[in-house]
Image (cartoon, rainbow, N blue to C red):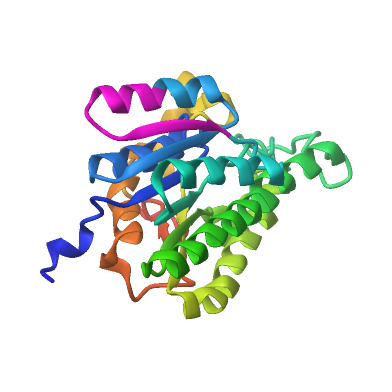
């Protein structure tokens, strides 16, 4: 097999959670553009259906499913519908996530009264952990269920699961809401643990740890506030915040056989933010 052939995912199927917008939509587009059939799963079913219709109009095989990742039964139903439509599952992006609100500092470096550990809303904590950590577990659990069944049923073995973590799971981010950091750190450690557990079944699991990307999370405020956008651009070593299209090549790498010797790992893609600002 030639080097470029290893990136070929034609004839495979993928399911992406949180695919109606942002990073999840970029993953779904990357899979479709590379020739895979894709299910866009999102609690925003109207958005998912709209984007799936656009992909179909562009000549791709795409469909939508409503999926609240904090509800295990809803996740299972979305995966069962994908399995019924495509006869198995080869690639899964456990991507859906939500903003956890403001951290203990605001971007100007002042204390945020609602972001302190003694003032943080416990209901918001529970919701963030439910979506950003438990939702990833629910997604992986159902993906693996189908990938294992597929391998036994028709001799095709394995699959690739890619989780969206964050560099906030690796370093302290004082402007990020408190539960977001342990949730993403938990995702990274779950990936390491499951890399070992799933290796026997030829199911690979890896994580992408993005830094500052322009998405709709947090109400899409970076798209609306040019002052905040410019401030963020100024502290990224590579010069600016990233657009979600810049994640597509990495997504294809981890989804395809080009990464067939990678499991239990994570890849940081953050413009050098974790290296510290240079002059």
- Magenta residues? 51-66
101 shown above or below 132: above
Q: Residue furthest left?
A: 2
Q: Residue furthest right?
A: 118
Residue 245 is left or right of residue 86, and the answer is left
Q: Where is residue 164 drawn, in percent x and y?
A: 50, 51
Let me know if residue 63 is in the magenta part. yes
215 shown above or below 200: above
Q: How many marks?
A: 0
The image quadrant where one finds the N terminus is bottom left
Q: Residue 204, can we see it?
A: no
Q: Where is residue 61 drawn, in percent x and y?
A: 30, 35
Where is residue 278, by image quadrant? bottom left
Let me know if residue 259 is in the magenta part. no
Foreground pick, 191 / 232: 191
Q: Residue furthest front?
A: 153
Residue 222 is left or right of residue 136, and the answer is left
Residue at image point 35% right, 60% down = 254
92 shown above or below 120: below
Where is residue 63, by image quadrant? top left
Foreground pick, 185 / 87: 87
Residue at image point 43% right, 40% down = 85
Q: Residue 190, can we see it?
A: yes
Residue at image point 66% right, 39% down = 74
Residue 10 is left or right of residue 85, and the answer is left
Residue at image point 86% right, 41% down = 122
Q: Where is residue 190 drawn, in percent x and y?
A: 61, 66
Q: Where is residue 54 drawn, in percent x and y?
A: 32, 22
């Amino acid at each position: 097999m030639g080097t470029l052939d290893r990136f070929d995912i034609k004839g495979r199927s993928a399911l992406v959670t949180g695919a109606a917008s942002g990073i999840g939509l970029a993953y779904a587009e990357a899979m479709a553009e590379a020739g895979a059939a894709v299910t866009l799963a999102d609690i925003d079913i109207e958005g998912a259906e709209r984007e799936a219709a656009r992909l179909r109009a562009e000549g791709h095989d795409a469909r939508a499913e409503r999926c609240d990742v904090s509800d295990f039964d809803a996740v299972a139903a979305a995966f069962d519908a994908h399995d019924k439509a495509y006869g198995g599952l080869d690639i899964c992006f456990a991507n859906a996530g939500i903003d956890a609100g403001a951290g203990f500092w605001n971007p100007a470096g002042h204390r945020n009264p609602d972001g302190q550990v003694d003032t943080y809303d416990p209901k918001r904590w529970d919701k963030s952990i439910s979506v950003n950590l438990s939702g990833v577990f629910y997604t992986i659990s159902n993906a693996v269920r189908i990938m294992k069944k597929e391998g036994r049923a028709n001799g095709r073995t394995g699959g690739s699961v890619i989780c969206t973590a964050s560099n906030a799971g690796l370093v302290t981010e004082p402007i990020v809401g408190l539960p977001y950091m342990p949730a993403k750190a938990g995702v990274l450690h779950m990936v390491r643990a499951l890399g070992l557990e799933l290796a026997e079944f030829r199911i690979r699991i890896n994580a992408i740890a993005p830094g500052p990307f322009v998405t709709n999370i947090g109400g899409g405020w970076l798209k609306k506030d040019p002052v905040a956008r410019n401030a963020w651009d100024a502290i990224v070593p590579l010069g600016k915040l990233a657009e979600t299209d810049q994640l597509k090549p990495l997504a294809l790498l981890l989804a395809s056989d080009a990464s067939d010797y990678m499991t239990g790992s994570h890849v940081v893609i953050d413009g050098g933010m974790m290296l510290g600002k240079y002059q």
